[in-house]
Image (cartoon, grey):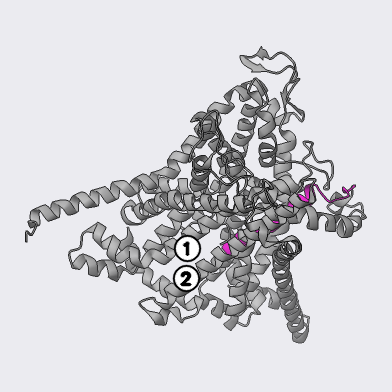
Amino acid sequence: MSTPATTVRRSKPHVGARTIARRRLLIDRAWWTICSLGLILLAVPVLWILIAVVGKAVTVFHWSVLTHTTSGVGGYGIANALVGTLVLAVGVAIVAGLVGISGGIYLAEFGGTGIFSTLLRSASEVLAGIPSIVFGYVGYLTLVIGLGWNLSLLPGVIVLAMLVVPYIAKATELALNQVPSAYREGAEALGMSKPYLLRKVVFRSAVPGVLTGLIIALAISVGETAPLLYTAGFTNAYPSFSLIGTHQNSHPIGYLTYAAYGFIEDPTAVVRNLAYDASMVLIVLVLVLIIASRVIVRLSQKFAPNRAVANLSRQDRRKMRELAKGPSTENAT
Amino acid sequence: MTVPSSARRSRNQRIGTQLLINGTRLGAVVPVLVLAAMVAVLLVEALPAIRYNGWGFFTGSLWQGGNPYGTPTRSGGVYHLPGAKYGAWPLISGTLESSALALVIGFPIALGAAILLVEKLPRRPAAAIGLFLEILAGIPSAVIGIWGIFTFGPWLAKHIYPTLTHMPNVPVLNIFRGVPSSNGEGLLTGGLVLAAMILPIIAATSRDLLLQVPDTTKEAAVALGMTSTEAFWAVQARWVRSGVIGAAVLGLGRALGETIAIALVSGGAQQVATNIYSPMSTIAATIVLQLSSAQGDPTGLAVKVLAEAALVLLAITLVVNVIARQIVRRAAKGAALPLGVGF
């Protein structure tokens, strides 16, 4: 631990103490300046992207783009894409929510740390690292071509859902693991059955964590383009109510990221402007989701059983969690 | 009023528990099945292309679908258009080069930011920067691509690249000598945009690792008379070293698979980059840009070739991700990297 101090003392014995002190101070300043530079360079792209895209969008935005479709009847708009994105998001919440939450419950409550569970967890981690275009391409091969569903809602939803399942499963598992062990012990002492205990006691206090995971999953799926291009397709009209198409009939569905990516290089200025409108709506959607997740975290801290914990600093809270880990990990397995 | 006997109630409880275990297990098994299905589907689909292209897929630089009006011929048991030739080396090298650039640029920035965030900033500004990270992670790649092609790229081409090209002709610095395109589309712009996209994951992961360093050890270092910089290198740097490397590799994995932003700013040229400004393309961008035209190949080989490309991309990202997680797991017994998008 004391290496740097000793090197400083040993290396230049003939240099005066004051020079050494000044040099150390200088190095200290230089180091933190470099780190500050990193922080500035990290903030620049965020602000720049927001200012460039939203700044351009505000000049071309008109509320009517939210009520008209891209087909150009009575004016151009992205209402079809907005509706499509919301429909896809609902579909993802249902499919990925069901699969991810149940997977998370299994890993936290029944999985343990055996080979089987390790395999499941690793597969989930690996799945999260696979590029979304690969998901899209496999979805195209299997669902669109293989099952003959053509470009339609269900292939898009399934591909997006598989993309985000790992995030929901992980969030659920972590949330369940953090439920205080006293809750379970108390409930078990009262003779509750495992399903009842989970439903009434454990899951209730894990809800904020699960919801946050679900919101992250929605933010990812709202922002994806690549996996949807060849599964959901794109249409200028409102989405139809069909889940799947047939070999002859496709039921493509519009979404905002396509409006942003596909329209931006269009020769017509009206259509190009729609790309900026779509980008701004996307940014607003993502901001809403991020704020929602923050509100959930804040509320859950405020109404946590132990309010004193919520008012501690982040470091202190972490330390308390470390202390609490002893008994709770043993219970979670 | 009938009260169920206790025997029946306990049997119902047992059945309920079994149902719950088996039901949730179904959900937990899905990722494994999806992963296996993806590999299997891509392998089967790509098999004819693998047989047709052979090793030339990795070494060749020519990518042409063949004469669309010619009669499909059969060689090696695979139908193909006359003159069809697929060499993916420009795509593979473009993917690796742009991601390496992104990592070289993005890693120091993200790490510096994370260090300052944890060690120096008070709680509230740190939370605000955390929000910045989440926003950057949440901005759709299509939007970042639009910024890259219409704002960032032209700005670089106008203000930065003209100066960079006059770098002295000495090793390392001479990679910047070359002729940039007028709108900035190309390898370096692609690398910079990718760098912006992997900042959140590296920064957020490094921040979480640094927060796990126990305060008492830091305090001990400072009590010995170290400056905060010396304390950082003596304590925190050693504590998080391998984890941070894992975070960097995780960011690399993200950069390798990024599609839409790179499709917009790369210049879309299937050629090996001759200098750092050359227009290029990546595997992911090529799949997205070529799938609709590939469907026009009557022999179906073009689609299968894209499956082979997807398989190569899958293999690269799988290796990168497994390495990242292995590094962290070995260093911090059992600790796992977050899945990470930077939220």
Protein chain holding label 1 = A
Q: Given the image, on which type of amino acid does mark 2 rest?
A: Val
Q: Are marks 2 and 1 in contact (CB under 8 Å)?
A: yes
- Residue type at mark 1: give it: Thr
**Residue at the image point whose x is 56% and y is 65% from the top:** A288
Residue lying farthest to the front in this orientation: A74
Which residue is at a point 46% across and 48% down the rendered structure image? A124
Which circle marks residue B315 in the picture? none
Q: Distance between the residues labelled 2 and 1?
A: 8 Å
**Which contiguous range is marked in magenta?**
B179-205
Q: Residue at x 91, y 58 (%)?
A: B163
Q: In this view, does B336 lie above or below B67?
A: below
| Secondary structure type for disc 1 | helix
Location of residue A270 in the rendering, given as x and y in whole percent from the top left corner: 76, 52
SS for callout 2: helix
Same subunit, labels 2 and 1: the answer reads yes
- State the residue position of label 1: A212
Quadrant in which residue A38 is drawn: bottom right
Residue carrying label 2: A297
Percent x, y of residue A318? 46, 73
Q: Earlier in the sequence, mark 2 or mark 1?
A: 1
Residue B294 in percent (x, y) is at 67, 29
Q: In the rendered image, which quarter contains the C terminus of chain B? A: bottom right
Q: Which chain carries label 2?
A: A
In-image side of B94 versus B31 (left or right): right
On screen, residue A184 versus residue B11, left or right, reads right
Looking at the picture, tell me which residue is in the foreground, A19 or A67: A67
Other-residue count near label 1 (Cα within 10 Å), few / some / many at <14 / 14–19 / ≥20? many
Tell me: A272 left or right of B25: right
